[in-house]
Amino acid sequence: MAGNDRHDRNDGSGAGGAGVSDEEWARFVEAAGQGVGEAPKEPSARARMVTERLRREDEQRAAAARGRFGARRKSVPVEPPGWRTGPAWQEMRGRGRAKRRIRTTLAVVFVAGLALAALRPELLVDKLTGEGEERDRARIAAPLPAETARPTAAPGPVDPDRPTLKEPFRGSPALQWADGAAGIELPAATAVNGVPKEQVASLLARTRDLLVASNLDPAVLAGTRPEAALGLLDPIQDEVKGRMERALEKPSAEDNPLFLFSRFDPAEVRFHGGVVKTRGRMTVEGGKEEGEVLVHADYTFVYPVVRAKGGSDEVARTIVRRTVTTAYHDPKRWQVTEGKLQLVEWKESAGNDDCSRDGTGYLHPTFVGDGRTAPNPTGSVTDPYDRSTPLDALPQDCGTVSRS
């Protein structure tokens, strides 16, 4: 019986024959471990059976894998449930997912970078050439100090980038100029030619008011009548008043309001950004006779504009340099209107203005997108930012500008 038991235990498959129950086998193993009873002389038939069954299942899965994928794959041993649910396995899977996420993120960033480079290649160029750093330095650079004397040369070259709606002065030396009226600084007033300091200071202030009203007033830039500027002038100067009225009502090359006022045709362009860049200076001198004082103003104004039609995103700049001479005359010796300006002389020169349309009473900027320049630009090439040459010495022909 014992031999049959052993035979059943070694060769039985569990599908037939009585064999030894699991409970009995466990008791026997426990007793053998305590030195009681006889220990088995060979491996358990049940153990051999389980081992053989697992081996066959491994081979069957490996064969199935080879048949499905057409390549030899390493078999995965059958393991008891729960072995792959422990922390180590979970951590390994987590790291795998993290790596996949990182690769996916890097791929998305790479694709986004390619798209950005395609849309704005200048960003890549800036990174490679360092021009972006130069542009950033120019953008945050402090404004230039006030101009107290005539410059000895034109402003140096700057990044030739085109202006944008967000940065209308990009690529212009005017980027570091003062904004609007802040660029019209007055020199210290002193008594001159028998005229008290207070009267000189008043003349300087009124001259500044005239420059602001004629060159910086948004309504005037939009082509409206410059009432505030006209109201500053002495009405006793009949000839001056008459010329101004004729220029505004019926402009011509001889009677041109642009000699004193900056105006754009609202049907063509509109002032953009709300800021005009300004640079220049005022000087004071005594007149030929006692009681007479002259103020010479020499200023350059830079105007960013866009086309009047909606949706336009190209910015053009027109640069106007203007000289104005005003005078104070002692009312005890001359017939004048106190508190009003005597206008002695006024001149202007404009860069990026279609000179073939001179006499219309408006400035006419040209745009790169137009694919053209002003007709017949046969004259000299000048730098509109160059303030080192007196306005009177500039060419009077219809030329071109080296930059805008």
Image: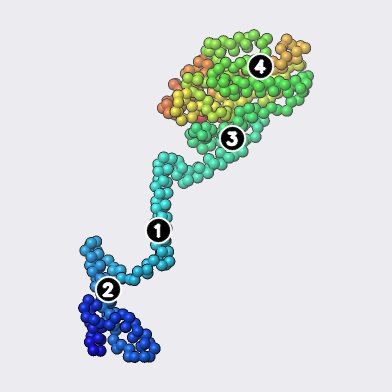
User: How many angstroms separate mark 2 from mark 3 (CA)?
Assistant: 83 Å
**Callout count:** 4
Residue for badge 2: 54
Q: Nearer the viewer, mark 2 or mark 4?
A: 2
Q: Nearer the viewer, mark 3 or mark 4?
A: 4
Which badge, 3 or 4, comes first in the chain's sequence?
3
Q: Amino acid at mark 1?
A: Arg
The kind of secondary structure element at disc 1 is helix
User: How many angstroms separate mark 1 from mark 4 (CA)?
Assistant: 77 Å
Q: Residues within 10 Å of mark 1 (few under 14, many from 20)?
A: few
Residue for badge 4: 232
Q: Quadrant of residue 44?
A: bottom left
Q: Nearer the viewer, mark 3 or mark 1?
A: 1
User: How many angstroms separate mark 3 from mark 4 (CA)?
Assistant: 30 Å
Decide which of 345, 379 is in the foreground and name it.
Answer: 345
Q: Is residue 258 left or right of residue 6?
A: right
Q: Quadrant of residue 388?
A: top right
User: How many angstroms separate mark 3 from mark 1 (CA)?
Assistant: 52 Å
Q: Position of residue 394 (x, y in %)?
A: 56, 23
Residue for badge 1: 97
Q: Residues within 10 Å of mark 4 (few under 14, many from 20)?
A: some
Decide which of 359, 86 is in the foreground and name it.
Answer: 86
